[in-house]
Image: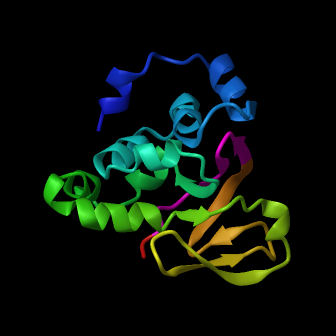
Amino acid sequence: MTVFAFALAPVTAAKADHYAKAPSVDIVDTAVAAGSFKTLTAAVQAAGLEATLRSAGPFTVFAPTDEAFAKLPAGTVETLLKPENKDQLVSILTYHVLSGKVYSKSLAGKQIEVATVQGTTVSVDGTDGVKVDNANVVKADIKTSNGVIHVIDTVLMP
């Protein structure tokens, strides 16, 4: 789970804020710089999805925080990160990703089903804030060079 911590230099809060606003930084580096997605970035690397999320995209990522992962039953994250569970991990992570850039303003006032990269749909309710399945979007529209990140408070399960 700490591969990114070893591979990347520490980032100050000022740099993290800069990355969140700078369109030249991709989804992965934006998540790493924020500091609240350590579990997500470790899972992305374990699933072999880092190169994809660094590619041109564009992608929309519903990014669960470390606190969201902590809500899962004890041992769930550790189990998912095992090599023998890679297919399940890929399925869960790609359920958090949409093809293209989807900003919160395009979801406002709507209740829709949206296709995920995983191949199924996720329910989006934009009638009172934005909710994705059972997760609340707690910070929306973080622009990156290859898409947009919406921070969510719960891990989505396909």
Display coloring: rainbow
Is residue 127 placed above or below 73 in the rendered structure?
Answer: below
Left or right, 155 with respect to 15, comes to: left
Give the residue at x 71% y 83%: 112
Residue 4 versus residue 157: which sits nearer the camera?
A: 4
Is residue 123 left or right of 46 when viewed as pictured?
right
Region in magenta: 142-156
Quick one: quadrant of the C terminus? bottom left
In terms of image quadrants, where is residue 153?
Answer: bottom right
Judging depth in this view, the residue of 19 and 119 nearest the camera is: 119
Instruction: Name the spot of residue 23 as percent of width and height, x first.
Output: 73, 35
Q: Position of residue 141 (x, y in %)?
A: 75, 50
Kindly identify the residue that appears in the image at 48 percent across and 41 percent down: 37
Q: Position of residue 113 (x, y in %)?
A: 64, 83
Rendered-image quadrant of the N terminus: top left
Count of number-bearing discs: 0
Q: Quadrant of residue 146?
A: top right
Image-quadrant location for residue 66: top left
**Vertical placement of 89 versus 55: above or below?**
below
Magenta-span inclusion, residue 121: no
> Does residue 133 appear to the left or right of 118 in the view shown?
right
Q: Which residue is found at the position 54% from the left and 18% from the top?
A: 11
Q: Is residue 144 magenta?
A: yes
Q: Residue most toward the front?
A: 56
Q: Is residue 24 above or below residue 8?
A: below
Nearer to us in this view, 136 or 141: 141
Q: Is residue 107 left or right of residue 157?
A: right
Which secondary structure type mostly characterizes the magenta part of the structure?
Answer: strand
The residue sitting at 37% across, 30% down in the picture is 4
In x, y percent, where is residue 89? 31, 61
